[in-house]
Image (cartoon, helix red, strand yellow):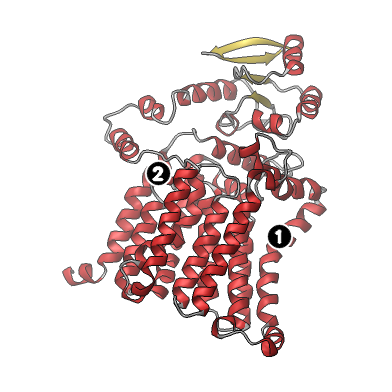
Amino acid sequence: MLKALVKHKFLIITVFLFLILRIPSLFEPYWYGDEGIYLTLGEGIRKGLTLYSQIHDNKPPMLYYLAAIGQTVFGFRLLLLIFMAPTIYFFFRLADRFFTKRIAQLSTLLFLVLTSIPVLEGNIANAEVFMLLPTILGIFIFLEAKKTQDYLISGLLLGYAFTIKVPVAFEFMFLGVFIFLEKIGLFDGFNIKTVFKKIIQNLPIYINLIIGFLAPIILWSIYFYFHDAFKPFLNASLLQNFGYLSSWATGTHTNSASSGGLTTRFAVLIVAWIIIFFLYNRKIIHRQAAFILAWFSAAVFSVLLSGRPYPHYLIQLVPPLCLVICGFFSKTFERVKWTLLAALLFFVFIIIKYKFYFYPVVSYYRNFYSYALHQKSQSSYYSYFGYDVNTTYEIAAYIKSNTTEKQSIFIWGDEPYVYPLANRLPPEKYTVAYHIVDFNAYKDTFTDIKSNLPQFIIYYPMSNRSYPQLDNLIKRYYYASRAFGPILVFKLR
């Protein structure tokens, strides 16, 4: 028995750490805004609404279908926990390709912790966490590829990850550039006489990789085309994101992506790749270091696409970051430690420059385990996540007890959690006020509300966002039913 425990101690430590860090996330209340949106769209899917045309958000579709499967915060987080178990396993298999088993284990434990604790929102069911599994598995199969079809599978997995979150496209781009340069012999000394011959010889690899990546996107396009939602799908999940990329820097969705400095950051990525591949070509760094550093550069660019300092964006960077950090402990990376150090210093630089913020860890776990041990009430436990969380539950309970499942409600505010908590949907496609504001959809939203008057309107005070048409409609058709602090609930007369 003791020998078996010693033999499998890494597995035992990994499973214990995974459970102790992840289980608290299953019992969090409805508090995180984006999750509220995902679950609302998931509810809409289950009730037969078509994404983008009848209920809206600006991410690719796969995340909302995962939310539809999860149904509740608990179910959604449980689904994430299930996703993360094989993610950790395949990250270990990936790290094992670069390092000795002991260092691969160290890298895996670091990866497990960073993707589980709340410091980077690893506990939240965000797209960045879900897309880790297909991304890591796709890169692992890419490195293990022995047949042309393996590249098709690698591309399919990265294409699937793309249908969860768009920035993974740059990791696919990195793989494409890397395999192209390697297959034409650039890293062994470029010969112009043989380059075209090698391109033709390896064309099936490039075609399979590209077809694999495009296949999930094409399938979703066909699906939405036959549901009369291709244009809304294209706009919401892809085209609108170009405005979104610059909106943090410019304060509007109407600017081009270059307005937010995206072009400059892309130029930096290209320069970084040129330097890395030059060092590889000159045999100053080996293939493993070149691969990790080029992947790290692509992930950094993806993280900085919008210039926003949201901690969950950094999740995409965690896999190559863990490999870079653990490279310092590997003898095979002894000669390239200065390049690894440069990568880490650049990571610190972007954290400071873009002012990334982080969530507390110790208080998060103390809050949960105090509640689990009955040292804290549920109300007090919920309050940790926000002073208004308990109010949200009160509003949802009131709405649920005073409406039928077929009746709609409308929330004028950025608090979408009432929809999934009350199991109700809005009468129009937007779930939060900032979507209506950002896309200047006041007129269309008002038209939809007026043609299908919701049973209740939940009105959050927002001094910087006036909606005179809605105010006039409330005066004409509604009366004040309840007040939850400053939040007013109006009921249809």
Query: Which image quarter: residue 449?
Result: top right
Q: Which residue is mark 2?
A: 119
**Residue 460, position in %: x, y?**
60, 19
**Residue 329, position in %: x, y?**
30, 68
Q: Secondary structure at mark 2?
A: helix
* Residue occupying image coordinates x 60% and y 37%: 37
Residue 444, compared with residue 241, is above or below; it is above
Callout 1 amino acid: Ile
Could you say which is closer to the camera, residue 55 or residue 359? 359
Q: Are marks 1 and 2 in contact (CB under 8 Å)?
A: no
Query: Which image quarter: residue 383?
Result: top left
Callout 2 amino acid: Val
Label 1 Cα neighbours within 10 Å, binned few <14 / some 14-19 / many ≥20: some
Residue 244, compared with residue 14, is above or below; it is above
**Residue 32, position in %: x, y?**
50, 36
User: Can the viewer see residue 287?
Assistant: yes
Question: On the picture, is 49 further left or further right than 34?
Answer: right
Could you say which is closer to the camera, residue 178 or residue 315? 178
Q: Which residue is mark 1?
A: 217
User: Can the viewer see residue 124?
Assistant: no
Decide which of tag 1 and tag 2 comes sooner along the chain. Answer: 2
Q: Identify the disc placed on residue 330.
A: none
Question: On the picture, is 223 further left or further right than 72?
Answer: right
Q: Secondary structure at mark 1?
A: helix
* Residue occupying image coordinates x 64% and y 25%: 411
